[in-house]
Amino acid sequence: MIQSEGMMHMPPPGFSADVPPPPQRFKPWFVNLPEIFMISVLVVGFNATIKLTIKGQVEEQKNKELEKEKLQTELAFLRNQVSPHFLMNTLNNIHALVDLNPKNAKESKVKSLEEKHPESKFMRVHRSYIVNTDKIATVERFRIVFDEKVFIPVSENYKGKFNVFLKNKFLE
């Protein structure tokens, strides 16, 4: 029993006054140095892993966007190549050429195609192009526009002839 200020108290069960105090759990900081070093290495490692993961995801997203843009550009290029106006014009030219002279169809040049088509409907505007004048939508700085995505250049050699055509078309 313990007496304090004239009162008697019973100690709680299992308590003994002879039990020494618990040992000190904290060590000086330099004793914990290896543990501190290991924790620091782990924190730095986790930080680096997170940064590299985020950087990889950002680069992967950029690569996906570039690939998507590349595919869209290639698709637009292919659409321009297979435009209905070009395709129809080319097929008509080939059909007419084969009908007129099947043996010489392989050796034929644009010049011979130009000669075989009526000047009132077809006009040569470039060494590689003969266009159907009825299909021209607009003209922008010596470029013929068939629709919003199909352009054909008018070369220097054919600008004079093309200007005369435009003047006649708009004066009619």
Image: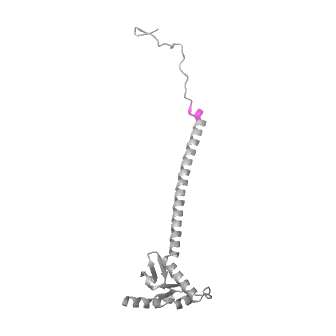
Question: Which quadrant of the figure has residue 36?
Answer: top right
Residue 77: % across, % down: 52, 72
From this viewpoint, is residue 125 visible? yes
Bounds of the magenta span? 28-32
Q: Is residue 134 above or below residue 81?
A: below
Residue 70: % across, % down: 53, 66
From this viewpoint, is residue 128 visible? no
Q: Residue at x 55, y 84 (%)?
A: 95
Q: Is residue 49 above or below residue 159?
A: above
Q: Nearer the viewer, residue 103 or 74?
A: 103
**Is residue 31 found inside the magenta-colored segment of the image?**
yes
Q: Residue at x 52, y 75 (%)?
A: 82
Residue sitting farthest toward the left: 171
**Is residue 165 found inside the magenta-colored segment of the image?**
no
Q: Is residue 167 above or below residue 68?
A: below
Q: Residue at x 44, y 77 (%)?
A: 147
Question: Which quadrant of the figure has residue 25?
Answer: top right
Q: Residue at x 56, y 48 (%)?
A: 49
Q: Is 166 on the left or on the right of 127, as rendered? A: left
